[in-house]
């Protein structure tokens, strides 16, 4: 799953502040990195950090290391267009034409004295695109900086990775992530129980931006029906065909729940945090551990193939049939 883009004030993301100031100092130093690779777990805020770095690099009047918000460059950023910024959002497969446009962009005279290329979800470059990027990275113009972002850095060719300075973006602690979600929801006028948010973080594997994207996609309305459907499937109260059809109405969220429930079935301490899920955990615990491990591996493979297949229903239905015998 890839997160939806979630708009957040960067200064409200405390665990990224140290990363931002450290990296901005590199770009403002005498030997700035010509290519930076931000990598780490999906949903920890790498895209948010990349956007903040762009604003800081291009701002002409930084104040305490933060963009001033009033110079021409900051106004361009706020408008959604900056002549010295070329951004590839990576919402789908990144093809060679998008990368070739960088070569034309590189020849332009910068308005701010420097230009920045941002490639989000860089691991979505196909081979031709990656080879085209490599040509630019091998002989980069002195006024051109690259910022790449990836949650699956291992999918990138080693030739591209070797031309970048790697920077691992750490996830926040559970309590820090929980406070972040509570603070944002309160500011939006929502009163959400802390235990609800704690479970949301857990199924997001403690990645707050993934959790936030679920919230903005009506998680509160979906969660009850999804959990009931999973319970009814595992207890054989409904058929796999009927249950899977309901789950796939919220496919990403359903996979997150299934992964969380399976992994938690091996961890008593984790299960104890969510007594409301005891009925589902009891069903799973009555199944042999070896079977649960095998089914987890199969679910990982189905999830991996989701991006290349147009239909998941047959695979997930077969998974439940196999699981339930």
Image (cartoon, rainbow, N blue to C red):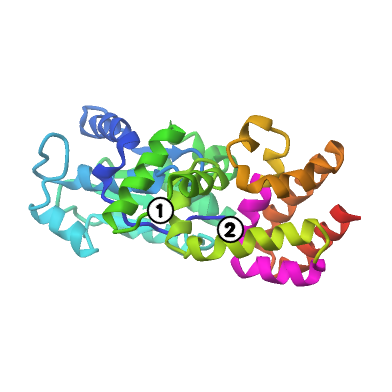
Q: CA distance from mark 1 to mark 2?
A: 18 Å
Q: Residue at x 48, y 53 (%)?
A: 132
Q: Is residue 302 left or right of residue 274?
A: right
**In this rendering, which labeled residue sits more in front, label 1 or label 2?**
1
On screen, residue 264 above or below 89: above
Label 1: state its secondary structure.
Answer: loop
Q: Earlier in the sequence, mark 1 or mark 2?
A: 1
Label 1: how many Cα within 10 Å (few below 14, some 14–19, many 20+): few
Q: Quadrant of residue 254?
A: bottom right
Residue at 38 percent across and 47 percent down: it is 181
Q: Position of residue 159 (x, y in %)?
A: 54, 38
The answer to whether residue 236 shows anywhere in this view is yes
The circle on residue 253 is 2
93 in relation to 287, above or below? below
Instruction: Give the residue displayed 27% in from the left and 53% down from the top.
Output: 187
Return the residue at label 1: 192
Location of the C terminus (image quadrant): bottom right
Magenta-colored span: 238-260
Left or right for 73, reference 217: left
Residue 302 coordinates in the image, percent (x, y): 73, 55
Position of the N terminus by quadrant: bottom right
The numbered disc on residue 305 is none
Identify whether 252 is placed above or below 123. Answer: below
Prevailing secondary structure class for the magenta stretch in the rendered image: helix
Residue shown at the point (27%, 46%) measured from the top left: 10
x then y, percent, for residue 73: 14, 54
State the image coordinates of residue 3 (x, y, percent, origin top left): 48, 55
For label 2, the SS is: helix
Which quadrant holds residue 13? top left
């Amino acid at each position: 799953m890839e997160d939806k883009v979630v708009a957040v004030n960067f200064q409200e993301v405390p665990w990224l502040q140290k990363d931002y100031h450290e990296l901005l100092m590199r770009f403002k130093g005498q030997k700035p990195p010509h290519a930076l690779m931000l990598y780490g777990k999906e949903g920890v805020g790498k895209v948010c950090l990349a956007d903040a770095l762009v604003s800081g690099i291009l701002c002409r009047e930084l104040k305490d290391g933060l963009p001033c918000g009033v110079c021409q460059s900051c106004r361009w950023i706020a408008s959604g267009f900056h002549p010295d910024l070329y951004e590839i959002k990576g919402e789908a497969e990144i093809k060679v034409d998008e990368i070739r446009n960088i070569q034309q962009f590189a020849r332009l005279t910068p308005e701010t004295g420097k230009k920045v290329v941002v490639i989000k979800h860089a691991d979505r470059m196909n081979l031709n695109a990656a080879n085209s990027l490599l040509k630019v990275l091998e002989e980069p113009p002195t006024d051109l900086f690259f910022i790449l972002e990836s949650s699956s850095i291992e999918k990138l060719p080693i030739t591209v990775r070797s031309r970048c300075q790697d920077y691992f973006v750490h996830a926040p602690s559970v309590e820090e992530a929980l406070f972040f979600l509570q603070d944002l929801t309160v500011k939006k006028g929502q009163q959400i129980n802390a235990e609800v948010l704690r479970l949301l973080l857990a199924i997001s594997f403690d990645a707050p931006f993934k959790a936030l994207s679920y919230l903005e996609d009506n998680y509160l309305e979906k969660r009850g029906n999804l959990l009931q459907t999973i319970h009814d499937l595992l207890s054989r109260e409904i058929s796999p065909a009927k249950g899977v059809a309901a789950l796939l109405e919220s496919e990403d969220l359903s996979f997150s729940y299934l992964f969380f429930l399976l992994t938690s079935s091996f961890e008593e301490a984790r299960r104890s945090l969510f007594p409301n899920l005891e009925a589902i955990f009891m069903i799973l615990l009555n199944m042999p551990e070896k079977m649960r491990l095998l089914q987890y591996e199969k679910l990982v493979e189905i999830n991996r193939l989701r991006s290349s297949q147009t239909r998941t229903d047959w695979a997930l239905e077969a998974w439940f049939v196999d699981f339930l015998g």
